[in-house]
Image (spheres, helix red, strand yellow):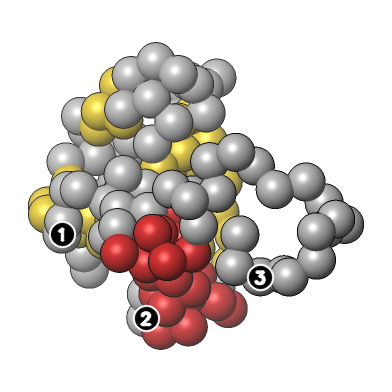
Amino acid sequence: AGFTENDNPWLPIPDDFKSRNVKEQLADEKSILNLCKKLLKHRKSSKAIRDGAYIPMDSNNENVFAYLCSSKNEQEGIIINFSDQEQTLSLDLPESKLILSTYLDRGELILDPKHIILRPNEGFLFSIKN
């Protein structure tokens, strides 16, 4: 698998190791590895996420977890769909800017909080326009 020369490694090596590995994930811009890298990079640059107050939001949807992080000059939000079904919700927030989706395919766009559609198991990171 590229990380040991031992014939009997401590943990079993999965059968799909040739297609599921760091080298392949680095090459796939929508991989979970690249999502984690983008989230960590954003966390380092966002005072609201790093140091801000946690403010829970009522999504009126048992499948969706939503909260804000608020600092003196920044407010950002997280919305996560924990179901395998598309979820539609409305939040009482001003117009916002989508920073990223966990699918890594939406890019930065204006988010209408009154009509949010989350795909199965999708999460949004967004900033609230002041």
Image spot of residue 49 (x, y percent): 50, 70
Residue neighbourhood size for the residue with mark 1, other residues' Cα within 10 Å, grouped as few (<14), some (14–19), many (≥20): few
Task: Please tell me the numbered disc located at residue 108.
Answer: 1
Task: Report helix, strand or loop for mark 1.
Answer: loop
Task: Report helix, strand or loop for mark 3.
Answer: loop
Relative placement, left or right, of 57 versus 35 is right
Three-letter residue code for mark 3: Phe
- Residue 44 sits above or below residue 75 on the image: below
Three-letter residue code for mark 2: Asn
Measured in 3D between alpha carbons, the distance from the residue under mark 1 to the one under mark 3, in whole angstroms, is: 37 Å
Measured in 3D between alpha carbons, the distance from the residue under mark 2 to the one under mark 1, in whole angstroms, is: 20 Å
Q: Which residue is mark 3?
A: 3
- Residue 109 sits above or below residue 57 on the image: below
Task: Report helix, strand or loop for mark 2.
Answer: loop
Q: Residue furthest left?
A: 110
Q: Nearer the viewer, residue 116 or 5?
A: 5
Q: Is residue 103 visible?
A: yes
Relative placement, left or right, of 80 versus 100 is right
In what quadrant of the picture does the N terminus appear?
Answer: bottom right
Relative placement, left or right, of 79 versus 15 is left
